[in-house]
Amino acid sequence: MTNVRVRIVAVVAVSIGLALFAPGGPRKACSQPVPGGTLDPLTIPKFVTPLVIPPEMPKSTVQPGVPAAAYNIAVRQFKQQILPGGVWNTVNGRSDTFGATTVWSYGRAQDKIPVGFIAPAPLSSNISFNYPAFTVENTSGIMTRVRWINDLVDAKGNYLPHLLPVDQTLHWANPPATGCIDGTNRTECRTFNTAPYTGPVPLVTHVHGAHVNASSDGYPEAWWLPAAKNIPAGYAARGTVFDQFDPRNTVKGSAYFAYENDQPAATLWYHDHTLGITRNNVYAGPAGFWLVRGGANGDAFVDDGTSAALNDGRLPGPAPRAGMGDPNFNAAIRATIREIPVVIQDRSFNADGSLFYPDNRAFFEGLNVSGATPPQFPGAGVLNIPFIPNSDISAIWNPEVFFNTMVVNGTTWPQLESAPARYRLRLLNGCNSRTLNLTLFTVTGAGPDGIMGTADDVLGAEIPFYQIGAEQGFLPQVVMIKTGQYTPLPGNGAIPAGLAAPDPMQALLMGPAERADVIIDFTGLADGTVVRMINTAPDAPFGGFPDAPADIDTTGQVMQFVVKASLIQPGDALTTPPENLVLPAEASLPATVAVRQLTLNEEESTRLCVQAQPDGSITTLFVDPMPLPGFLSACAAAGGMPMGPREAKLGVLVADPMTGMMMSMPMMWADIITEAPVTGTTEIWEIYNLTMDAHPIHPHLVRFEVVDRQPFDMMTFMPSGPAVPPEPYEQGYKDTVLAYPGQITRVKATFDKIGLYVWHCHILEHEDNEMMRPYMVKIDPAFPDVNADGKLAVTDALDLLKKLKSPLLAGAPYDLTGDGTLDVRDVLALLRTIVFGPPR
């Protein structure tokens, strides 16, 4: 099937050429931007807006109800100046003021948003609503309690519809609780309703990477609606398994969660996780950093390997913290900041400044909608096929989407004036589908067009990233990263010979949701030096290198730094050079008790046979009324092929009952749970990727070690080559890993909190259409320690009684009798175990 992958890669490969990214290499400004909204990204000036530094989220001083929470955080709709406002456009010699963009994001609930408000705003305004959201600061080992409030209502208290097109034919939250394709009327199902959803928006917040109790994890079916006045009759206000850490909370439109933070210091982030519409909700804006500091592996235990003193290493700082002043509207405070959370996202916009997200499947194919004018791709063909309910293809959902503008901390192509000092950036790939491959180059001048920020700019020396941490804390060693080379540093001041990256193009590679804690060293750079962050991953699904790089005029550029000597601070001389850093060591996980074999799958239509035409159009050959055994052969005989992809799925590797051969069994979200580790056990998950894409896989709850990757034969599932250890930047603890096509990716994790969680691909368009599965951590029936205090006592039985009311725990996690439910009989069984020991 010809799709956007082929179309975009072909255009970019011809127009750019890999030589563009070699310092001093040939440059030509003839690339073609990724298609998107009605705003041409080439008309947006770059590097004219200062990088927004997310401040710390202020704690609540007003409580909307009981129990009290440290944070009462609401999601609201407001406008933000994401595009440049009131700048001189050197491209066409005119002053451009781009319209503000309507977004959603989190902020302190007590802060009032006035009419006409446009973010970002000074801290003195007492308005903490911003995209991305302010950073929630946490201390390792100390619980953080949050009341999350869905406040997507207008000034009159009526619900606000979604900003983006929501496809109701996916398995989604379905608040109308009607019209399921199986004939039932309920939430959480697929429907035959092909119209975009316009009702009240469901939300549920997930802290990505949190080692947290199941009630507070943000399970996709635990969503809730805003407390709007006009919720239609019959709508469900909550998802099937809505739950709270503290059920005493009765504040309408909210849920009360608590996070133990019982994990080492780490770079986490929070975002929406509602079933079937995560891609829409996150694209609209609500996401922010959740940083865990302190503990035995915190910054205080970093060492300088060139001195005899212990724990005397000093990382760049400070970070923006409450009470220190405004990092964005106070120049003196801004000049002191050396640690900055940085989220990179791709977005597209319309001419009025609004967000663009496609409302039709033809967009993914690079085609036009039959009969629609004006065409979304002038000169292209047409996608002329039937959709659900007349086939099994959804009309709105796009398998992946790549946008044409880079947005960093809520601003297009920003610039940071930097001291000639060391900076610590906590980088997050917050894109829906896009993989990033980041490099840093000095820019020695504009090219022949005289305009900085275009493809003919002359690049100078490459500046390395020094990666000190991944998603779940410090790496074993600092890794110096340059294009094609990784260099683990011993911490004694030496810089040994580097290791070759898997491909000469590879640099700081980050799949969606991956994080990299890095140091950039600007020391020694002359005043006025320009350093540009460049992205050389493709404008298309990523399956590994080599690949055509992103459009250098648009998505190939990320942000820019300009060295300014006047910003130097006395503390800058005290930070430790990266090559001297010795990072806190972490123990390895315990021995493995089980190995699970899992699969990644992409499925095509089982009903719709199509054919590509000379002009690129895709037309229908025939549609079977239902899936039939002979569909594939009949489609091939007719000269066609099944329409695809239809959906992406996780699955399990099983033996064919007829032949004994190994086979992949793809699973739906609603299928029976197949992954159910016993609490406290350590498992290796072997993930077999049967697709063309690299998938960023994220299991909730756990931090894991990447064990290795190994190629396999897709027919026999037998390894076809040696296992390769993880890359140096993957050798710390992680929570998201890229699983490459044709490879087994092995990860090792300990499952130690009882309850219902999920694992999924973090390409949000995949996650929303079946590439997510529930998994369950079960209590150990031989030692049912409910309160996890290391002993069995009557208090465990009392705690189990309390859990009878928890929807997320009402089934098998605490089932001690084997009947698949949690009831009083399980409490009695626990009491018998306390008195007599486990049953023989």
Image (spheres, rainbow, N blue to C red):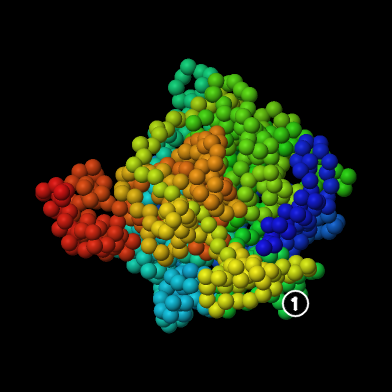
Q: Residue at x 48, y 56 (%)?
A: 664
Residue 64 seen in this snapshot: no
Residue 43 position in % (x across, y down)? 78, 58
Would you say 104 lies left or right of 261 here? right
x, y percentage for residue 63? Answer: 38, 61
Name above or below for residue 245 compared with residue 234: above
Residue in view at x 18 percent, y 58 percent = 827
Q: In the displayed orientation, state which residue is furthest to the front.
A: 659
Q: Where is residue 97 in the image (x, y as percent from the top left)?
A: 75, 61
Of residues 198 and 169, the one drawn nearer to the viewer in this rendering: 169
- Residue in the image at 75% along x and 41% along y: 21
Crowding near pointer 1: few (<14 within 10 Å), some, many (20+)? few
**Visible in this render: residue 96?**
yes
Q: Mark 1 points at which residue?
A: 373
- Badge count: 1
Toward the top, the furthest residue is 308
Q: Which amino acid does label 1 sit on?
A: Thr
Please identify the quarter of the rendering in which residue 235 is found. bottom left
> In this rendering, would 811 be left or right of 80?
left
Up-down: is 829 above or below 726?
A: below
Residue at the farthest left position = 835
Q: Which residue is found at the position 49% from the left and 76% from the top? A: 191
Q: On the rendered structure, is 571 left or right of 363?
A: left
Quadrant the N terminus occupies: bottom right
Going by the picture, which residue comes out furthest to the bottom?
A: 233
**Is 82 in front, or is 393?**
393
Q: Where is residue 806 in the image (x, y as percent from the top left)?
A: 30, 62
Per the image, label 1 sits on a secondary structure element best described as loop
